[in-house]
Amino acid sequence: MRRNNKQLITLFLICFFILGIFNFGNQQLKIMEFEENTPYPKTADTNLNVAVLNSVVVPGYATGGFTNDYLTIYNALVISGFDTIIITNADIIADILLTVDVLILVDNLPDIAASAIVRDWALKGGGIISFDSSINLLNWAGLIPPEADGINGGGTYWNYGSTEQGKVINDGHPVMNGYTYGDILNGTAGDSQYLTDVIMTTSAGPYYSPLVKVDLGSNYDLAVALDAPYCGRVVHIWDYLNWNTTTNRQMILNSINWIREKFVDVPQTIVINEVNAGTPDYIEFYNYGPSINMTGWYVELYDDNILDVNYTFPDGWMFNSHQSVVLYEYGGTDNSTALYTGGNIYWASREIAVGLFDDTGANIDWFQTFNHTLLRPSDAIWINNTYIHLASNVAYRINDIDTDRASDWKVSASGSVGTLNPDQKGHFFEFETISGPVAIFQDGDPWDFNSTLNILEMYGISYDVYDSFDFGVIDLTPYQKVIISSYQNQGFYDRLDGNVSWFETYAANGGILEVHACDSTMGAHWHGSYLMPGGLDITSMTLDDVDINMLLHPMILNPHPVNDTLLDGWGSSAHGYFDTYPSNSREVLQHTSTSYPILLDFEWENGFIIATMQALEHAYYYGDPGSEFLENMILYDPSSTYFSDTLNVETPNSLTSWQTGSSHYIEWTTKGNISNVKIELFRGSIFEMEISANTTTDGEFYWTFPLSLIDSTQYQIKITDLSNPYTYDYSEYFEIYNPTLTVTNPDSSISWIRGTEHFLNWTSTGTLTDVKIELFLNGTFVLEIAANTPNDGEFTWNIPSNLTTSALYQIKISDVSNSLVYDYSDNFEIRLPTAPGSLIMIIVIIIIVGGVAVAVTVIVVIKKRKPKI
């Protein structure tokens, strides 16, 4: 009968179409159900605003291909309940980011002018989610990592070499909620990927979390998260084509919610940022924290010690996060960035003061001129350590550090009303300085310049000056810090040699010893003959190549942020580097070509030692750019919370040997104010994986060791204080091993008969509870002998009588709980039984071949014939 092919084809297409609609409909239903259950993220008081960039411009710093698929993600986010807008480069230049919390770059970039604005916005706390080639901006803006600032970083910190698929390696991070370790995510080959080993050595390293890698042990990061104090949270994802799948979309929505948390968690910090006594008079405030309803807050303005204006913020007025508001005299229309007193601020005498108070009447911030004698509120702090006089001038904060001192401010003919001041980044630093007293040891001012004394006087810190004949005589107990000045005479250094232990004892008892070790490279010196306190020794040379090794160290940031270029430009910026120093030293500055430290600090029993080879006093006297670094160093208090917190990993230790697949407690102790930590695994000093991105400091963390880890005795656990990446500890080296199985019977000599019973035997190491036993023939699965049997090393097997005869059988035994642990036996034989009544004759024939006797064995089976009937 002839078939009707057309009817068959038509029937097939109809069935395929119906099934396709059914499957597609189910998929859409799942997506919509997921979207409806998505949490609606909020800041402290307002909805989280998300912006998706629409830009086809490729700025000059970028490399790679770009797609600008902004509309797809916009529509999906709107459906998912997020307050989302589409923005352009023109919008960014028009300050649209003032209303945005999260910016999404879908394989696109802002133009060069807009990129600069995005960079500043991100450094003030704005969150970014980027895809594929948008990685160019993360590098150029100095986000991941800061060292790439101004360049795209391609080939150094990342490349376009991704695989099509990636594996989840950090299911404990909030961005990976709903995923499991080892899950496979689909993407596109040839997209962007960060290089783990390089990023971990940068200043972003302590805050950087790989989420998805090319493979579990790979060096290539396909999805990463950054939670750093120098910028808002950042998530980068390698693929832009497949993000909209149900699986990958969860990661995007998680990212938005994770970025939201940072806006909620930031402490409330509002400061008086600028005061203008010109025309019109105004006061600028800046909000470093989350958005806040200012109902009940008020400002007191004093003139000539008399309360001149008492202004109360409008009911319901919101002070947006990381924004400025200017309070002007006279009338005007209030808005989000400008408010008006409704009358005159009469600052004629210039003896003025400004106080900001919250709705409970507590003083939040205070400012006053040098000659203001008003009795301040009891909770208002102000140290008149320098001269502030306003005569139609503007006073403004010099940076983001608030030490409650007049020296936080600078007077100028003009200000930057409504915007951040020069050297401000929009991140508030709680900065604790020394309060004194200070002891200074010198036989004369360094280079005849009394720079150190001037700084102490400027900051209102008391001090005493001693010479080298006071070594070993003076009681150093009352002094918070002792400074040994630079560039002294040879007699000074000779007498110092016999009193090194005296200074060390001072530090050991809790003091702060600051050693300005810069001596003469040609004349008086202590290098080559004497060891300095702390066992320090140096290589003497004049140099100008100084690198910042710890970008977030307080001496680099507070109160005057400095950079490499500023520290290199003094002409003989340093007179050498330290070649001998304690292993626990924090190497703040390094010599470029040798990587030896130029500035370091370290704990010395109960105290601290700080030492530098820089020509600080000389540069400061001449006002070299960046020489205000001497102020940072003198004011620096390592005993403040920044370094007084300590952390010690206790378990594992050198005696620990843990098996993959097993669970154990990682244990540590802390001292100080450490609330949350990050836990990581290293092997041979190389980052292996993140165990926990954020866990509370309760001293223990229960962790199951992944089955994918390889055997090694060079593993270490690193635990880091999340609020301070320089507080961390590594465990001792310990062992992680995989359990083993070895099949011992059958072996290659075995020849078993079908239908007979035999023992299967094996040995094992590690903790294996139950095993599975299978039979293979020439590498192909035949049957399961036992799905689950105790790991006692023996199993009795009755060989089925229907098996094919062969000498290529193998027994496979594997761990029931970990299929990666298994072993195959040697090839062995399963054969037919010998027929009943058969006679077996073994004949050995010896023949001579080429003069050599050769034995040949012949087996003859003689079967008994049945008699014919």
Image (cartoon, rainbow, N blue to C red):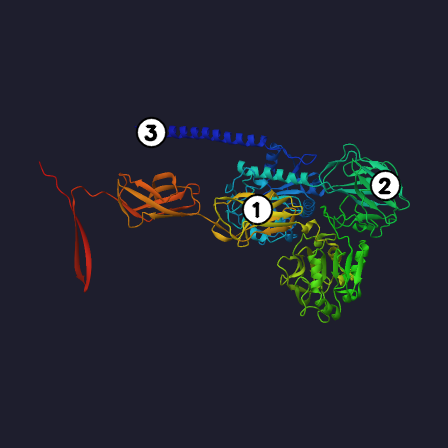
> Looking at the image, is mark 3 or mark 1 nearer the viewer?
1
Amino acid type at mark 2 = Leu
Residue 157 image position (x, y, % from top left): 59, 52
Mark 1 closeness class: few <14, some 14–19, many ≥20 residues within 10 Å: some
> Looking at the image, is mark 2 or mark 1 nearer the viewer?
1
Measuring 55% from the left and 30% from the top, which residue is drawn there?
33
According to the picture, the residue beneath numbered tag 2 turns out to be 301
Q: Nearer the viewer, residue 120 or 320?
A: 320
Distance from label 3 to label 1 (Cα)? 75 Å
Q: Assign the C terminus to one quadrant of the image.
A: top left
For residue 3, the mark is: 3
Q: Is residue 107 visible?
A: no
Secondary structure state at the residue bearing disc 1: strand
Which label's residue is closer to the chain start, 2 or 1? 2
Secondary structure state at the residue bearing disc 2: strand
Which label's residue is closer to the chain start, 2 or 3? 3
Q: Nearer the viewer, residue 858 or 53?
A: 858
790 left or right, relative to 661 = left
Q: Are marks 3 and 1 in contact (CB under 8 Å)?
A: no
Distance from label 2 to label 1 (Cα)? 54 Å
